[in-house]
Image (spheres, helix red, strand yellow):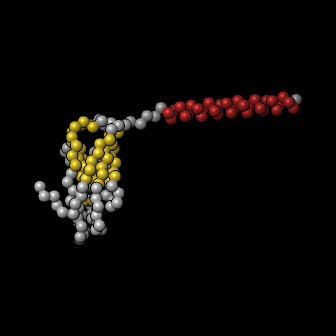
Amino acid sequence: MKTTKILSILGFAMILTAAISVSAFAIDKKNDRVSVTPMINHHVNVNLSLEKHLCNVYLVEILDGQGRMVAPAKTFIPGVSKYDFYERGPASGARIAVLVLAPVYGHFSCDTELFTKPFILTGKFSAGETYRYDLFPQTQPNKE
């Protein structure tokens, strides 16, 4: 009788273990089905070697041909040169990388102000591809 009880308990434990394993496997399979849609990657390099302190706040932005942001702006941090932006694709037209003074903060009385020529790419932008933009901020306005 003792042996029968022990075998019954062991059998029940094995059935319970098998059921838990099967349900865990089913949960893992559900998570595998989630696919990530590839995005267009806009990689902006801000090439700035500046000895002076910046007191104004600047934003790095990617705009379309109509001047609308295609991804949220990022705050420029002196010493950080790489900024990545992601956009659903595919897309076509113009994409413009800019470094602009943050409108919320406005101008402070700062010895150093940055002037940056926009970097423009035009054409078709494919999902899963990376497009590079190089910005070269200067402390003097561009003469054009």
- Is the residue 136 above or below the residue 91 in the image? below
Q: Position of residue 90 (x, y in %)?
A: 29, 35
The residue shown at (28%, 59%) is 48
Q: Nearer the viewer, residue 68 or 133?
A: 133
- Residue 74 drawn at (x, y percent): 32, 54
Q: Which residue lies furthest to the right in this view?
A: 1
User: Does the image show residue 68?
Assistant: no
Residue at 65% across / 31% down in the picture? 19
Quadrant holding the C terminus: bottom left
Depth order, front residue of 122/30 = 122
Image x and y of residue 29, in percent: 53, 31
Specify whether 43 is left or right of 24: left
Quadrant in the rendering for residue 11 = top right
| Residue shown at 24% from the left, 36% from the top | 124
Residue extending furthest toward the left: 144
Residue 87, percent across and down?
32, 42
Q: Is residue 8 visible?
A: yes
Quadrant position of the N terminus in the picture: top right
Q: Nearer the viewer, residue 25 or 56?
A: 56
User: Number of labelled discs?
Assistant: 0
**Residue ID at (79%, 29%):** 8
